[in-house]
Amino acid sequence: MDTGPVGGGASDIAPMNFEDALKALEEVVRRLESGDVALDESIDLYERGAALREHCQARLDAAQARIEKIVTDGAGKPSGTEPFDAEG
């Protein structure tokens, strides 16, 4: 079944960067909200949208894990880093 510009299966999602996956997700939502899609295609689009949302969330989670907070010394100068989610 052709899903147009959003087409492809879950296998084409894995290599997507966050921005491309978000654009594809927005297109899925736009098509679903238009109401001009047959039931079977709507189900396919919904499944693709769920996979794209999961991919976007995983990319955001990975980015957050990489963020580091700058630790300053008594004079306010950077003295190192610590994990983003560390208490301090």
Image (tube, grey):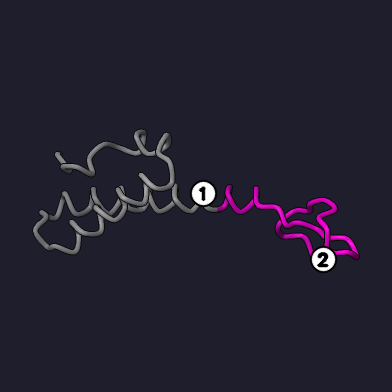
Q: Which residues are magenta?
A: 61-88
Marking on residue 58: 1
- Identity of the residue drawn at 85% across and 53% down: 79
Whole-percent x, y for residue 84 in the image: 71, 57
Does 45 sit left or right of 1 as displayed? right
Q: Amino acid at mark 2?
A: Gly
Residue 30 image offset from top left, x and y in percent: 21, 59
The residue that label 2 is drawn on is 88
The residue depicted at 36 percent of the width and 53 percent of the height is 50
- Decide which of 88, 70 is in the foreground and name it: 70
Q: Which picture quadrant has residue 76?
A: bottom right
Q: Residue furthest right?
A: 74
Find numbered disc 2 in the image and state the secondary structure of the residue it sits on: loop
The secondary structure type at the circle numbered 1 is helix
Identify residue type, mark 1.
Answer: Ala
- Image side of residue 71 versus residue 62, left or right: right
Graded by Cα atoms within 10 Å as few (under 14), some (14 to 19) or many (20 or more), the crowding at tag 2 reads few
